[in-house]
Structure formats: structure tokens, C-alpha cells
Image (cartoon, grey):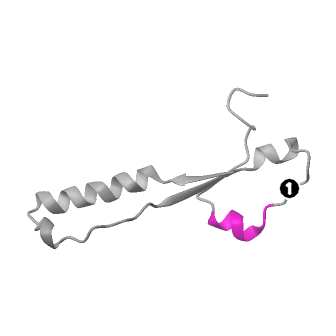
Amino acid sequence: MGMGADFYQVGRETGDLAARILRGEDINRMPVLYSLPMKLVINRGVLPKLKADWVLPPDILAKASEVKSGAALPGKK
């Protein structure tokens, strides 16, 4: 399970701002945005390998951007 910045979304928002500027919008009238979109990724494939029994609540799974069910880690068995 990991949570971090959604850099794809950050890039989209940055591109949108650049397009507004290139279309001639006055940057002095643009608000300063302090936004960092977050992304939660869950890999259910590791749960059987843990010592304790983990159960992920449905509300946490619903918040995840991605839920993977594959191998524990790339290149690991």
C-alpha cells in the first residue's frame, strides 16, 4: 500500500495553467494554487505473504486509485 503525489494529475494541471497563459490570460489575476493531488495504490497480492491476517476495509479499497492483485514485488518470488 502506498500513497503519494499523483504526478500525472500535477502535470495535467500545470499544462492547463500554461495553456491559459499562452492564450493571453493575465497571470496577475490568476490565483496561486497550492494543490497536490494524492494517489493511493494497494497491492492485494502481498497480503497472503504477511505474517498477520490483513483485511482491507471496503471504504479504503474504494478510495484507492489502483488495486492490484498481482505478484508481491516486480522481480521477486
Secondary structure, magenta segment, majority class? helix
In the rendered image, the vertical position of residue 5 relative to residue 50, given as above or below: below
In the rendered image, the vertical position of residue 4 relative to residue 25, given as above or below: above
User: In this orientation, which residue lies closer to the viewer: 49 or 27?
Assistant: 27
Segment colored magenta: 56-63
Q: Quadrant of the C terminus?
A: top right
Position of residue 76 in the picture relative to residue 2 (left or right): right
The residue tagged 1 is 54
Q: Classify mark 1: helix, strand or loop.
A: loop
Q: Judge whether residue 60 is colored magenta.
A: yes
Q: Residues within 10 Å of mark 1 (few under 14, many from 20)?
A: few
In the rendered image, the vertical position of residue 57 relative to residue 44, given as above or below: below
Position of residue 40 in the picture relative to residue 61 (left or right): left
User: In this orientation, which residue lies closer to the viewer: 27 or 13?
Assistant: 27
User: In this orientation, which residue lies closer to the viewer: 72 or 1?
Assistant: 1
Q: Residue furthest left?
A: 24
Q: Judge whether residue 76 is colored magenta.
A: no
Q: Which amino acid, by three-letter code, is at mark 1?
A: Trp
Image coordinates of residue 47 in percent, x first then y, are: 82, 48
Residue at point 20%, 56% (across, down): 18
Image coordinates of residue 26 in percent, x first then y, are: 10, 68
Residue at point 35%, 51% (across, down): 11
Residue at point 41%, 56% (across, down): 9
Residue at point 87%, 45% (across, down): 48
Image coordinates of residue 36 in percent, x first then y, are: 44, 60
